[in-house]
């Protein structure tokens, strides 16, 4: 049983990695960054502080 709600749309790095994930139900973009065993995820915000929202039809 997999979780198909989120899809990774961008990835950069290996040991220190930054990824962008999109929630397919809401379209909200999230930034995930990890370094070694530590990591964190937060909504991706635009210049006005609002969440970046993608159209989910193409994902």
Image (cartoon, grey):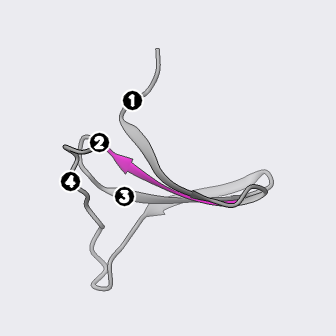
Which element carries disc 2, helix, strand or loop?
loop
x and y, in percent, of residue 30 in the image: 43, 58
* Residue marked by disc 4: 55
CB atoms of marks 3 and 2 within 8 Å = no
Above or below residue 1? Residue 38 is: below
* Residue marked by disc 1: 4
Q: CA distance from mark 4 to mark 2?
A: 9 Å
N-terminal of the pair, mark 1 or mark 4, is 1
Residue at 37% of width from left, 50% of height from top? Answer: 22
Q: Start and end of the magenta stretch?
A: 17-23
Q: CA distance from mark 3 to mark 1?
A: 15 Å
Q: Residues within 10 Å of mark 4 (few under 14, many from 20)?
A: few
* Residue marked by disc 2: 24
Q: CA distance from mark 4 to mark 3?
A: 10 Å
Q: Residues within 10 Å of mark 3 (few under 14, many from 20)?
A: many
x and y, in percent, of residue 7 in the image: 42, 42
Q: Is residue 33 left or right of residue 50?
A: right
Select label 4 or label 2 by which is in front.
4
* Residue marked by disc 3: 29
x and y, in percent, of residue 12 in the image: 62, 61
Q: Residues within 10 Å of mark 2 (few under 14, many from 20)?
A: some
CB atoms of marks 2 and 1 within 8 Å = yes
């Amino acid at each position: 049983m997999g979780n198909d709600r989120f899809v990774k749309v961008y990835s950069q790095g290996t040991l220190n990695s930054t990824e962008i994930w999109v929630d397919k139900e809401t379209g909200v973009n999230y930034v995930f960054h990890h370094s070694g065993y530590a990591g964190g995820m937060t909504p991706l915000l635009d210049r006005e502080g609002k969440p970046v929202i993608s159209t989910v039809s193409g994902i």
